[in-house]
Image (cartoon, coloured by chain):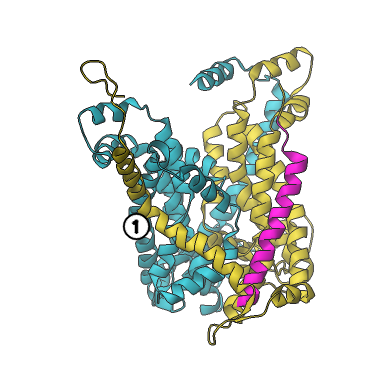
Amino acid sequence: MATIARTQILAVQRPRPQFRVSRVVFLTLAVIFTILALMPFLLTVSGSFKTVSEILDWPPTIIPATLRWENYVEVWTNSRYFPQWIGNSVFLAAFHLLVYLATCSLAGYAFARLKFPGATVLFLAMLGSIMVPGQVLWVPKFLIINQLGLVDNLFGIALPDLAEVFGVFFMTQFFKSLPKELEEAASIDGASTFRTFRQIILPNAYPALAALAILRFQGEWNAFQWPLIVVRSPDHLTLPLGLASFQGLFGVNWNWVLAGAMFNAVPIILLVVFFQKYFIRSAASSAVKG
Amino acid sequence: MAVIAGGAVRRPSRFRYWRQWLTAYLFLAPYMIFPLIFIAGAIVLALYFSFTHYDLLSDPTLVGLDNYKAAFADESFLHALRNVAAYTAVVVPTQTAVALVMAAILDQKLPFRRFFRVAWYLPCIASSVVTTLIFKWLFLPDGFVNAALNAIGIGLRINWLGEEATAFPTIMFMNIWATAATFMLIFLAALQDVPGPIYEAAHLDGAGPVRQFFQITVPLMRPAIFLVVLLGTIGCFQLFDQVAIATKGGPNESTLTVAYLLWREGFRDLNMGYASALGVILFVVIFGVALVQRRYLDVRPDY
């Protein structure tokens, strides 16, 4: 608490350089960065509306001569499995959010508040596991799900993803920040630990759970490496895998590739723009995971 | 610490400890089962299989250090290792510098700073598949990048991802574009902890904003810079998505990375033992580089 108060006071006192020249330089740089960041997306939107012949034009046009909405319909109907890919990705994200948020908030609460032998060792072991690159585990993880008969199965993607350690750290930190008085009142009333957790603690954790949910949705919705290893058949692909396979499928029909990419990018972009506050906070702490 | 009537403090009995522990383990179990299998178990299996020949069809046979010896005699692996080292050496310093500048700009009271923050962050939230496909399209011989070059008078039509000389630099650019803003967020959080009076003193001493940035902000942010360099290095050594989607290691293996080679060996050619050994070596290399960086970068600021 003391440090928070200190930073706030200092933040107020901090003088800002008011030189006009430096502000102009900063603003110019900011505009250049913005153009660099947004231009590829804007060109993608424009490309996704172009006709097959216009997209091959040289020099390329920035604004399409005619807006061809049909690209979006065709990507949906011409590639037989496109709706299935979206369905698979939605299923994976929903399954992950439901199960992962429940399991890691329970575990986070145990680490934050309950006393048990081995707590420190377990926590440090999980922290250390962050240093192990995911790719080291590709082969053994594949062999395990092969034993479980889950190769080319959506659960072969979903189950190993539940081992993600970041959420547990995130929830542990959050539960530690809650005042202890919350549970003390409940335990005087004789409520069990689980009931206290369910009825007192969890309702106070909604903002943290929302932030974690957005971050994990992004991770699952965009996942590429592990699904690439697990699934084979065209109807089991996720949306990112399906999009990647588009390149070969149509001899690269770019207006369809770009229209298809919009189905992957737009939901996540909307989510982040609307829930910016939650997202930026959790993203800064999740960067520790990479 | 329940105080019972009469003033005696009730101490929890041994039975109550056991109940408490049991409750804690029940809270942990639904989560812990997954990392036990898919992280702890997988690490043990990775080590075991790295000492075997295994092609999924016949039983694994123990071969001692053969896979490790083979790796260091494998020209493709050594080439991939050199590639990721060069890649890291270019990408990490560049993205760290760009992220630091972005954070410093957002820390000013500029108009539209909330808009800038979201706009700069968009490349980081789109999936690697989407951003790679977009860049592949932009960098086509008939694409917008060549068009932009022509517009400013450089009449080249480069096949960026199809030429040995330009393919890897294009992927480097792609990745800096896609990840710099993630690290910007770390710097932005750290900038908030730099004490204001230091700037005030510097301002009174006549130091301009550029000098303040290099002589105050950068030194005080060393812990954050270390974190960003470390995370960036770990990420760069694992480069996979852009290579798998855009170039498949080509042209002529010029964009081959350790992760892509590992995938090719393990899941295309079914050399599971050899792929495991490559993974273990990759881990050791990343860990070693991290230790060296810690030695030189992780110094607490004193103020």
Q: Is residue B96 left or right of residue B36?
A: right
Q: Residue A234 placed where, x, y %?
A: 43, 78
Residue range of the region highlighted in magenta in the rendering: B273-300
Q: Residue B37 placed where, x, y %?
A: 46, 63
Q: Residue A36 placed where, x, y %?
A: 63, 48
Q: Residue at x 72, y 42 (%)?
A: B97
Magenta highlight on residue B136: no
Classify B114 as above or below B18: above
Q: Residue A116 placed where, x, y %?
A: 40, 42
Q: Is residue B247 visible?
A: no
Front one among A284 and A116: A116
Q: Residue at x 57, y 45 (%)?
A: A288
- The residue pinned by badge 1 equals A94
Front one among B209 and A88: A88
Amino acid type assigned to the residue bearing label 1 in the image: Ala
Q: Is residue B293 left or right of residue A288?
A: right
Classify B25 as above or below B275: above
Q: Main secondary structure of the magenta part?
A: helix
Classify B158 as above or below A10: below
Chain with yellow colouring: B
Classify A271 as above or below A248: above
Where disc 1 sits, the SS reads helix
Visual hue assigned to chain A: cyan
